């Protein structure tokens, strides 16, 4: 079996894996994140982040063998970003000729109902992705721009789309169906899709390994907690419910996104404040969440202010925890039997205070927190006691490896 960054085995989700590296691309509207990953081992050969695309003060960071190389220059568009990417590999390594990727794996946020699995990108796939832009207008355009330029830059390499939504296509109709008019559901594909699928898939497999149980016999609630956040009920390796819905706005409180809201809110604000739909959409995506509650979208800053006695930051933390506990309890009931809870992503992996606040309220589920293990957690760590009926873990996510695995399996 392949091995994780920490040297532990990772359950293979099925299918053979090529031995060569995969260049994983995560393109946003103003950034390009990349990593050259050995699909069979998870070894990262190089990582990079190109920021401020479209601005005069572009910034590129390329890290190889523990050394970071920084470049500042104008990066007017994604084509220029890929030129920088290629130049960074050529100058600092590894050389993309001698360490030639077997494929390029692209993260795509929204695959709609059309894409239930990883696909090889061709003209038809690109056309369909463009039609899906209204489902994720803040994310998919950047993903598509990255794909288009990558196809021009690396025309001889297979290019694969790996969707955040694909893992959740196993949800039953009762979980993904909205109680809205049939014409909406049939004509516009209005339903719950879910996101962070690559993270939920990877972490749930790691949990099964840590429990030394077959994946198909393991039920886990994965809490992916970063600037974007979602919870997922994973039954036997399959997503059966998740907190996000049609868009990445729903569910948990996030950096600038609100999570669950009363659906009557836009009509109410239109009546009492004359707010337009574009204004409402902007507010929900850019001005809500932690930013609205505490004036700061960075969870670390909010926690520092909370510890200093800031009331707004304290309320923001309480709201975040309350929403987490509510979704955790609901997803546990959906599963019927809960074996483990896993915390992952930037906040989930690095905030023992948040983990403790959630798990201390999860005693009804059979969780007994090991406070010392939680406070000291670094990397993969069990943070529940040996006597706990439900295990709790910190599991660093590895979405890039998951994308590399998906791309590699498709081509073998």
Image (cartoon, grey):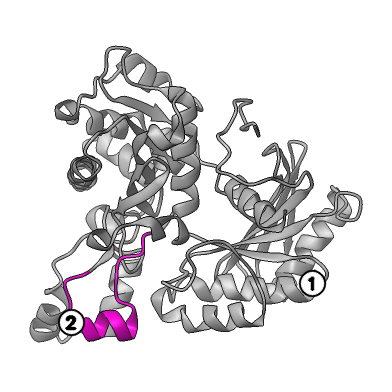
Query: Residue at left 39%, top 45%?
Result: 224
Q: Which residue is nearer to you in this view: 297 or 311?
A: 297
Q: Which residue is mark 1?
A: 153
Residue placed most toward the observer, 96 or 227:
96
- Residue 235: x, y in percent? 35, 42
Residue lying at 29% horizontally and 40% vertically, measured from the top left? 305
Q: At numbered mark 1, what does the secondary structure look like: helix, strand or loop? A: helix
In the rendered image, the quadrant that contains the N terminus is top right
Q: Is residue 238 above or below residue 183?
A: above
Query: Residue 253, image x and y in percent?
Result: 27, 53
* Residue 320 vs residue 203, the one in the foreground: 203
Residue 181 numbered mark, or none:
2
169 horizontally vs 324: left or right: right
Near mark 1 (Cα within 10 A), the count class, few <14, some 14-19 or many ≥20, is some
Whether residue 182 is in magenta: the answer is yes
Is 194 located above or below residue 180 in the figure? above
Residue 167 in the image: state x and y as whole percent: 45, 55
Identify the magenta region. 178-194
Q: Tell me if residue 260 comes above or below residue 381 in the rendering.
A: below
Question: Within the image, what quadrant is residue 299 found in?
Answer: top left
In the rendered view, tell whether residue 314 sits above or below residue 148. above
Q: Residues within 10 Å of mark 2 (few under 14, many from 20)?
A: few
In this view, the mark in front (1 or 2): 2
Q: Which x, y percent locates residue 121?
A: 65, 72
Residue 378 part of the magenta-drawn span: no
Q: Residue at x 36, y 22 (%)?
A: 383
């Amino acid at each position: 079996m392949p091995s994780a960054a920490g040297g532990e085995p990772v359950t293979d989700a099925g299918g053979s894996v090529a031995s060569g590296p995969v260049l994983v691309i995560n393109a946003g509207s103003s950034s390009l994140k990349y990593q050259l990953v050995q699909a069979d081992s998870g070894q990262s050969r190089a990582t990079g982040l190109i920021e401020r695309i479209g601005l005069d003060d572009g910034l590129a960071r390329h890290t190889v063998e523990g050394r970071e190389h920084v470049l500042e220059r104008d990066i007017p568009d994604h084509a220029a970003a890929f030129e920088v990417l290629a130049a960074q590999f050529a100058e600092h390594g590894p050389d993309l000729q001698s360490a030639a990727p077997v494929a390029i794996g692209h993260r795509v946020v929204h695959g709609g109902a059309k894409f239930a699995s990883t696909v090889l990108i061709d003209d038809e796939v690109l056309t369909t992705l463009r039609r899906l832009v209204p489902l994720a207008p803040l994310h998919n355009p950047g993903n598509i721009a990255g794909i288009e330029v990558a196809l021009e830059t690396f025309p001889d390499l297979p290019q694969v789309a790996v969707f955040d939504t694909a893992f959740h296509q196993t949800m039953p109709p009762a979980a993904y169906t909205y109680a809205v008019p049939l014409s909406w559901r049939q004509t516009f594909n209005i339903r719950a899709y879910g996101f962070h699928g690559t993270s939920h898939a990877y972490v749930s497999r790691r949990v099964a390994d840590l429990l030394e149980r077959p994946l198909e016999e393991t039920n886990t609630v994965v809490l992916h907690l970063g600037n974007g956040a979602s919870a997922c009920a994973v039954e036997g390796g399959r997503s059966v419910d998740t907190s996000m819905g049609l868009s990445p706005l729903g569910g948990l409180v996030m950096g600038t996104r609100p999570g669950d809201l009363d659906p009557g809110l836009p009509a109410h604000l239109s009546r009492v404040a004359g707010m337009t739909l574009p204004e409402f959409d902007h507010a929900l995506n850019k001005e809500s969440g932690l930013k609205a509650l505490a004036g700061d979208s960075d969870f670390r800053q909010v926690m520092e202010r909370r510890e200093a006695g800031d009331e707004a930051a304290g309320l923001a933390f309480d709201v975040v925890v309350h929403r987490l506990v509510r979704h955790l309890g609901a997803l546990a009931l959906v599963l019927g039997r809960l074996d483990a809870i896993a915390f992952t992503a930037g906040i989930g992996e690095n905030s023992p205070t948040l983990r403790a606040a959630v798990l201390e309220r999860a005693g009804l589920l059979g969780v007994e927190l090991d406070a010392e293990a939680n406070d000291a957690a670094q990397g993969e760590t069990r943070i529940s006691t040996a006597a706990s009926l439900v295990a709790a873990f910190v599991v660093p996510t590895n979405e890039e490896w998951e994308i590399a695995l998906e791309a590699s399996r498709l081509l073998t």
